[in-house]
Amino acid sequence: MARIIAITNQKGGVGKTTTAINLSACMATLGRKVLMVDMDPQGNATSGVGIERADIDECVYDVIIGGSDSRRVVRPGPIEGMEVLPSTLDLAAAEIELATEISRETRLRAGLEPLRENYEYIVIDCPPALGLLTINSLVAANETLIPIQSEYYALEGLVYLFGTVQRVKQHVNSGLKISGVLLTMFDVRTNLSKDVEKEVRREYPRMTMRTVIPRTVRLSEAPAYGKPIILYEPSSKGALAYMELAKEVVQSGEEGPGQGTGRADRFGGVEGGAATRGDTGKGDKA
Ligand code: ATP
Ligand code: MG
């Protein structure tokens, strides 16, 4: 059964899509079977792996609203071992249409059910909002990975996200965990990035991913070529960082409780963590 990871943050432009594409591609490079699901009507994850709008017959909208069989909607990805459930602008309507539907929060979970046997990982790219598309993703997921930009105000708004995770846990998906907070667009040349990292690790010592994603032009260029960084520039810093992240994520799922370097805590024991203390947003502290 696939481990389902939703990449969430209601803040725009923090690196969700870049992480969804490159984490998926790097896990596939490690020999894992991965499905990337694009839950953002902007369709950046879809176009970023070279799938053209004109070639998309049905998309994730048809799965969650039209009841299409998701197995039919899946497309080959940019790299062996990776497949894609694409999105188009149609999905923008889903947010409104879902509002009046029965079981509106569980549509994606139901839609992914026939696919779960086929993959080891399903990575969901979410839109920059805490609406029904993100809720559907959190309900379908086992865990959520939260990219944050290494800038001032990085932590602003996280408390709302933790609150949403907490409500989803309480009402629909008790097994949901926060797999980690990921620092993205880290600029090694600035003290600001280093200060932000320090602050984030102090606030969330166990939850912060060991891997940090550097700011590199190559990572921002790759989507224009429809390629994950591991194909576009395999020896670049960005590619190495996302490979590191893929290993960290894969490993975290394989560590038993009490093993490893404390990451098992973070992945296994979010009960005592931020997700249950969304009211303070500082749940990682003892
Ligand atoms: P949205 O909320 O709009 O969906 P997002 O959170 O998905 O945005 P991305 O689209 O991944 O964020 O990234 C925002 C912009 O920053 C993009 O132009 C992307 O190419 C660029 N970018 C992302 N990560 C990096 C990085 N590590 N280094 C340089 N540029 C980056
Ligand atoms: Mg995005």
Image (spheres, rainbow, N blue to C red):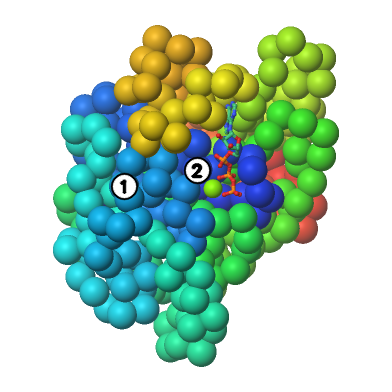
Circle 1 packing at 10 Å, graded few (<14), some (14-19), many (20+), is many
The amino acid on which the numbered mark 1 sits, given as a three-letter code, is: Ile
Indicate left or right for 122 with 154 as reference: left
The residue that label 2 is drawn on is 17
Q: Quadrant of the C terminus?
A: top right
Residue at left 54%, top 43%?
A: 16
**For residue 173, above or below residue 75:** below
Image coordinates of residue 233 in percent, x first then y, are 39, 16
Q: Residue at x 56, y 50 (%)?
A: 8
Q: Residue at x 77, y 26 (%)?
A: 196
> Image quadrant of ligand 1?
top right
Q: Nearer the viewer, residue 43 or 114?
A: 43
Disc 2 marks a residue whose amino acid type is: Thr
- The residue indicated by pointer 1 is 51
**Dot 1: what SS?**
loop
Q: Is mark 2 within 8 Å of ligand 2?
A: yes
Q: Residue 275 at x, y = what percent? A: 63, 53
CA neighbours of label 2 inside 10 A, class few (<14), some (14 to 19), many (20+): many
Judging depth in this view, the residue of 123 and 234 nearest the camera is 234
Q: Earlier in the sequence, mark 1 or mark 2?
A: 2
| Total residue callouts | 2
User: Is residue 170 in view from this perspective?
Assistant: no
104 versus 2 height, above or below: below
* Relative to 161, 29 lies left or right: left
Residue drawn at x 64%, y 27% is: 185
Q: Marks 1 and 2: CB-CB under 8 Å?
A: no
Residue 187 point in image, percent of width and height: 69, 18
